Image (tube, rainbow, N blue to C red):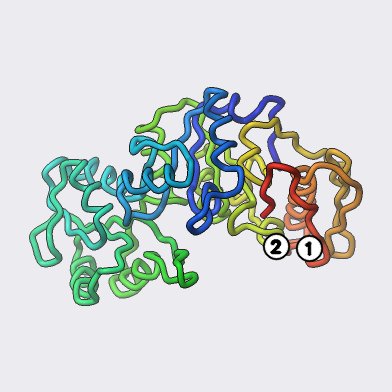
């Protein structure tokens, strides 16, 4: 259920496509060790791309933020769901097409880059594109919802239901998408993860014949990689914890698993499975009476790997997640950040 690589992933995959929040930074700070891990991956010859479902910020602002955190990044290294949405529209309608814009500056600049013409909610247009925008007015949402119900083609940058803010988790663009969808009865074409357009756009822009998706969320990053048919690395510096990991469905399971971005520059060995017992690097895990049990000692990354595989085996056989409430992950090793 997990893949193995006897060489560092940065040598096996020529492109790493990194989610941002929870992978490279958390809030306003870089994930501990992330800049150094990425520098080592680049030194090994791996291209690094930063991809985000956030359609509000243009790539140059994202790159500037990364550089402020000590992460090497150029504008050309950043790909957003706004750019992916604009590509979908450009491919469908061609340059010069008029598109109703319901979103922020990142979406406007992405449309212009594709040669599309952003227009207002009442203007003649072939389609509407929506994205996160805190200044979007309710009257404009109402007008767009009516036009979508009347048949105007609709592309949504993403469907993230929540976003992190300085004041806590807040409603994301997915709430707006659901509102228009329920009113109109129309499901939009979605550009962001877990759908393929954002990942395809990243490969197109940055290059790479053997890409690897790196993320912290099972339902966007890892599911998106599964949908695109590419391998993935789950890191545990963001939203995925023990409970979420052992409950991951087949379409949400990563190829590789590591506590943090050090996993890019290390070999990655899959556990061995013998009946109900899963073993790797001095750790053994199994589910007893519905509860996960782990014994032994070794590297923290190997602990997480045996727990994941034992949990997934049980989920597939029993139809319900194993109880992991009694488990305590080992402390992160030097240079790693445990999630």
Residue 229: numbered disc: none
Outermost residue to the left: 124
Q: Quadrant of residue 103?
A: bottom left
Q: Does residue 36 lie above or below 132 as drawn?
A: above
Q: Quadrant of residue 67?
A: top left
Q: Gap in Å between the C-alphas at discs 2 and 1? A: 7 Å
Q: Residue at x 37, y 47 (%)?
A: 62
Q: Residue at x 43, y 45 (%)?
A: 66
Q: Earlier in the sequence, mark 2 or mark 1?
A: 2
Secondary structure found at label 1? loop
Where is residue 95? Give x, y as percent. Answer: 15, 41
Mark 2 in CB contact with mark 1 (< 8 angstroms):
yes
**Residue in the foreground of this view, choosing between 60 and 104:** 60
Where is residue 270? Give x, y as percent. Answer: 75, 37
Where is residue 90? Give x, y as percent. Answer: 22, 43
Q: Which residue is mark 1?
A: 324
Where is residue 339? Give x, y as percent. Answer: 67, 55
Secondary structure found at label 2? helix
311 left or right of 68 in image: right
Q: Which residue is mark 2?
A: 243
């Amino acid at each position: 259920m997990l893949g193995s690589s006897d060489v560092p992933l940065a040598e096996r995959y020529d492109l790493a496509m990194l989610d941002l929040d929870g992978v490279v930074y958390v809030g306003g700070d870089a994930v501990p060790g992330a800049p150094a891990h990425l520098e080592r991956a680049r030194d090994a010859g791996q291209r690094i791309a930063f991809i985000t479902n956030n359609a509000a910020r243009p790539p140059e602002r994202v790159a500037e933020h990364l550089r402020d955190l000590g992460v090497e990044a150029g504008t050309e290294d950043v790909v957003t769901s706004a750019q992916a949405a604009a590509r979908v529209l450009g491919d469908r309608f061609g340059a010069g097409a008029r598109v109703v814009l319901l979103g922020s500056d990142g979406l406007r600049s992405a449309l212009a880059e594709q040669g599309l013409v952003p227009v207002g909610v009442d203007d003649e247009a072939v389609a509407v594109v929506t994205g996160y925008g805190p200044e979007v007015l309710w009257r404009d949402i109402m007008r767009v919802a009516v036009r979508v119900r009347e048949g105007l083609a609709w592309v949504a940058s993403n469907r993230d239901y929540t976003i992190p803010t300085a004041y806590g988790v807040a409603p994301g663009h997915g709430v707006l998408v659901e509102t228009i969808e329920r009113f109109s009865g129309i499901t939009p074409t979605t550009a962001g993860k877990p759908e393929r357009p954002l990942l395809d756009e990243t490969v197109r822009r940055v290059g790479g014949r053997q890409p690897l998706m790196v993320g912290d969320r099972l339902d966007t990053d890892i599911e998106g990689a599964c949908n695109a048919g590419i391998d993935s690395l789950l890191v545990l510096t963001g939203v995925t914890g023990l409970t979420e990991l052992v409950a991951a469905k087949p379409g949400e399971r990563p190829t590789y698993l590591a506590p943090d971005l050090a996993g890019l520059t290390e070999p990655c060995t899959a556990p061995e499975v013998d009946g109900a017992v899963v073993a790797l690097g001095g750790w053994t895990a199994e589910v007893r009476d519905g509860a996960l049990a782990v014994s032994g000692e070794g590297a923290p990354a190997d602990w997480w790997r045996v727990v994941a595989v034992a949990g997934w085996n049980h989920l597939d056989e029993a139809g319900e997640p194993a109880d992991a409430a009694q488990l305590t992950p080992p402390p992160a090793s030097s240079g790693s950040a445990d999630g």
